[in-house]
Image (cartoon, helix red, strand yellow):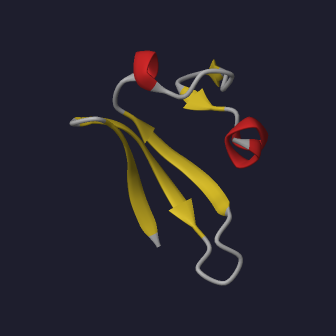
Amino acid sequence: MKYTLMHKNHRTLDVEIDTDSSGIVAAGDVYCAERIPVGISVKDGKPELQELKAW
């Protein structure tokens, strides 16, 4: 399923979560790179998927 990660009332990025494992399987559009959780790198406009999964 697709979800939007929020930071308070601000859209941050879209993610796809596997309903069976509850894990993030893909990162989508980034709306506000400044609000992505600390420790997650953004390269070429996309967050690093492995760092996002670990978060």
Most extreme residue toward the bottom is 20
Give me the residue at 45% from left, 21% from top. 33
Quarter that holds the C terminus: top right
Check the image and report above or below for 2 versus 29. Answer: below
Most extreme residue toward the front is 8
Q: Quadrant of residue 23?
A: bottom right
Most extreme residue toward the top is 34
Give me the residue at 55% from left, 28% from top. 37
Which is more toward the observer, 9 or 49? 9
Q: Please state if 1 lies on the left or on the right of 18 as rendered.
A: left
Check the image and report above or below for 26 versus 43. Answer: below
Q: Position of residue 49 (x, y in %)?
A: 70, 42
Give me the residue at 61% from left, 55% from top. 26
Which is more toward the observer, 54 or 15? 54
Most extreme residue toward the left is 9
Q: Position of residue 18 (x, y in %)?
A: 62, 73
Give me the residue at 75% from left, 36% from top. 51
Q: Please state if 3 lies on the left or on the right of 40 as rendered.
A: left
Q: Position of residue 29 (x, y in %)?
A: 42, 40
